[in-house]
Amino acid sequence: GSRSANQHNSELFTLTYGALVTQLCKDYENDEEVNKQLDKMGYNIGVRLIEDFLARSSVGRCQDFRETADVIAKVAFKMYLGVTPSVTNWSPAGDEFSLILENNPLADFVELPDNHSTLVYSNLLCGALRGALEMVQMAVDVKFAQDTLRGDGVTEIRMKFIKRIEENLPAGDE
Amino acid sequence: GSRSANQHNSELFTLTYGALVTQLCKDYENDEEVNKQLDKMGYNIGVRLIEDFLARSSVGRCQDFRETADVIAKVAFKMYLGVTPSVTNWSPAGDEFSLILENNPLADFVELPDNHSTLVYSNLLCGALRGALEMVQMAVDVKFAQDTLRGDGVTEIRMKFIKRIEENLPAGDE
């Protein structure tokens, strides 16, 4: 085992996350609904996590989507999951990119049972990214494009910029 | 914020654990049942975590319950939660002790709503300790004796030694 101390500490987290997904699979009728719940829970987590992230990372406002991509991969993923995905597959317009995870800490020791072939096991991450970015006035669409748990060679999270969210200025302040 | 990098990384874990407890509170009728589910999930986690723990900590078989207490506090809690509880309140017979947590990483930013005053929020830890120790042939009773979430000054996990579990030797091997 040459895993770092950081990955090591994440084992309890990984197993706890597994317990959450297992519970949701018991609670909801189909994978589609579980995926939705994980995304929703992730959103609520992202909304709370962003404050901690901004306070501790001392990252300022990103100038563009390319900078946002780098901060997510090199600072946020590193900080919270101990891994640094690569940023790749940019769309020509520069409004979409992929995060490629060689190793997904949430999915260590996980195998999807045959009857859950459409489960997006780590979907909480998509929700967390969406929630966190919404708090810095950036609406994005986030989804898993590939997943090693479903037999793909890598795990790929696809992020698409939708729009800047107007900050709600107090009435009379414009 | 003077929290260490280790505690820092645990924020996503803390929020994910919160999502799990929230989900269980939705699923089950009363706190008693949620406490039971958390303990059960923790047990399953402990059973899986022990292998990783023994492999990485290079801790050998403990000679007695006092040594077990020290390993849990100084190695296991440090490794998986980034905190080192103190070991105290030994029973005269040496079969019971308490782990005192000044700071419980699972309960950061948590406040129990009034209608969940009997929820043992971090009960997963009790189950995990019970499951892990059972795998090294030690039956223990584990429960929260105090909890800052319920207004106590500290968080106290009380552990009681029940018995050594006989290893099942293969037939004819005795």
Image (spheres, coloured by chain):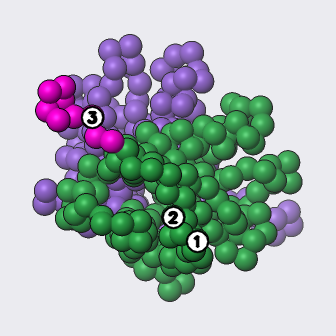
Chain colours: A purple, B green
Q: In this view, does A19 lie to the left or right of A2?
A: right
Examine the rendered structure and indicate whether residue A110 appears above or below residue A166. above
Are circles 2 and 1 on residues that touch, CB within 8 Å? Answer: yes
Give the mark nearer the N terminus: 3 vs 2. 2
Can you identify the residue that label 2 sits on? B95
Chain at numbered mark 1: B
Q: Regarding mark 1 in the picture, which secondary structure is present there? A: loop
Q: In this view, does A92 lie to the left or right of A138?
A: left
Give the mark nearer the N terminus: 3 vs 1. 1
Q: Distance between the residues labelled 3 and 1?
A: 30 Å
Disc 2 residue crowd, few under 14, some 14–19, many 20+, Cα 10 Å: some
Give how far across and how far down residue A165 sits, in percent: 61, 52
Give how far across and how far down residue B40 sits, in percent: 54, 38
Can you identify the residue that label 1 sits on? B91
Q: In this view, does B69 lie to the left or right of B159?
A: left
Chain at numbered mark 3: B
Disc 1 residue crowd, few under 14, some 14–19, many 20+, Cα 10 Å: few
Give how far across and how far down residue B25 sits, in percent: 71, 39
Residue range highlighted in magenta: B166-174
Asked if one can make out residue A149 in the rendered structure from this viewpoint, the answer is: yes
Can you identify the residue that label 3 sits on? B168
